[in-house]
Image: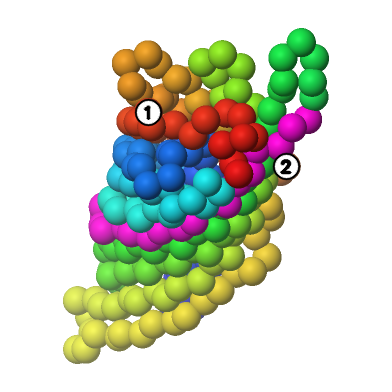
């Protein structure tokens, strides 16, 4: 039973980052850009292969020429294999997920050849929370009803450069995690159910590099592909999103004034 308890605590600090781009394009002041995002996160944390799927909707609103805000709403799950052959795997249910953030950006002049070349700098701040629950068994005799509530607080810094109908962007992201885990242990041999819960936090997450690409189609849509690898890990998270191109911010410094 102690082994199973420690296993739950180890897994309770494992969470999944939110994409910082998706897309990197920004709406004009007073305009909206709607997006549908799918994220598949796969990590190897403390020897455990952990997976998460996320399906989210986001509406980005241009507050000013340098600030966007956005809410997030959707669903997510969480899955990981057992710590030993005596414990079944956790296949977390799809649950409500929500959050929001703001993005600060500025168009920098970096190189002037025959035509000006610009790079836009971004700082993205976000909050995200979600649930996942499942029942796992230990030796087919003891069972655990487990529920995780995860909260993420993140900051991402990146730079984007547009070339024709493509926007290339890259940077890094750091996420602080905390939350709570509840579990109920019961068995056919017991006369009562054991219930407990625990809070957790994990400020020691390694920053993740970000590589992304926006593809601007003439049919008023933007396809975004984003990768987030781990340092010294064999897993890569990815995000695919489709956005309404809408009223895009002009790509000249004069519009920033």
Question: Is 199 rendered above or below residue 62?
Answer: below
Question: Is 128 rendered above or below residue 202?
Answer: above
Question: Is 248 rendered above or below residue 105?
Answer: above
Foreground residue among 79 and 127: 127
Please tell me whether mark 1 sits on a helix, a strand or a loop: loop
> Magenta-highlighted stretch: main secondary structure?
strand
**Mark 1, other Cα within 10 Å: few <14 / some 14–19 / many ≥20:** many
Q: Position of residue 213 (x, y in %)?
A: 55, 26
Residue bearing mark 2: 232
Residue 97 visible in the current orientation: yes
Question: Residue 109's image quarter?
Answer: top right
Is residue 24 rendered to the left or right of residue 40? right
Magenta stretch: give its range: 90-110
Disc 2 and disc 1: Cα gap in Å?
36 Å
Residue 86 visible in the current orientation: no
Q: Position of residue 55 (x, y in %)?
A: 32, 43
From the image, which quarter does the C terminus lie in? top right
Please tell me whether mark 2 sits on a helix, a strand or a loop: loop
Residue bearing mark 1: 245
Is residue 140 rendered to the left or right of residue 62? left
**Numbered mark located on residue 177 in the image:** none
Question: Is 203 rendered above or below residue 93?
Answer: below
Residue 186 within the magenta-colored segment of the rendering? no
Residue 101 within the magenta-colored segment of the rendering? yes
């Amino acid at each position: 039973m102690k082994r199973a308890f420690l296993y739950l605590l180890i897994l309770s600090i494992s969470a999944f980052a939110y994409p910082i781009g998706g897309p990197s394009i920004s709406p004009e002041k007073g305009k909206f850009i709607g997006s549908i995002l799918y994220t598949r996160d796969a990590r190897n944390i403390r020897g455990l292969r952990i997976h998460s799927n996320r399906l989210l909707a986001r509406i980005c609103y241009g507050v000013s020429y340098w600030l966007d805000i956005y809410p997030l709403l959707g669903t997510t799950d969480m899955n990981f294999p057992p710590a030993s052959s005596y414990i079944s795997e956790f296949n977390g249910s799809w649950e409500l997920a929500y959050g929001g953030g703001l993005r600060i950006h500025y168009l920098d002049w970096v190189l002037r050849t025959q035509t000006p070349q610009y790079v836009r700098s971004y700082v993205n701040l976000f909050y995200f929370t979600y649930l996942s629950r499942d029942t796992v068994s230990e030796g087919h005799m003891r069972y655990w009803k487990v529920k995780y509530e995860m909260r993420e607080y993140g900051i991402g810094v990146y730079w984007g450069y547009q070339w024709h109908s493509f926007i290339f962007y890259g940077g890094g992201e750091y996420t602080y995690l905390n939350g709570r885990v509840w579990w109920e242990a019961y068995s056919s041999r017991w006369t009562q159910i054991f219930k407990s819960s625990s809070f957790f936090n994990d400020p020691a997450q390694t920053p993740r590099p970000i590589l992304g690409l926006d593809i601007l189609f003439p049919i008023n849509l933007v396809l975004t592909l984003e990768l987030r690898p781990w340092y010294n890990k064999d897993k890569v998270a990815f995000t695919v999103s489709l956005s309404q191109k809408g009223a895009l911010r002009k790509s000249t410094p004069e519009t920033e004034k």
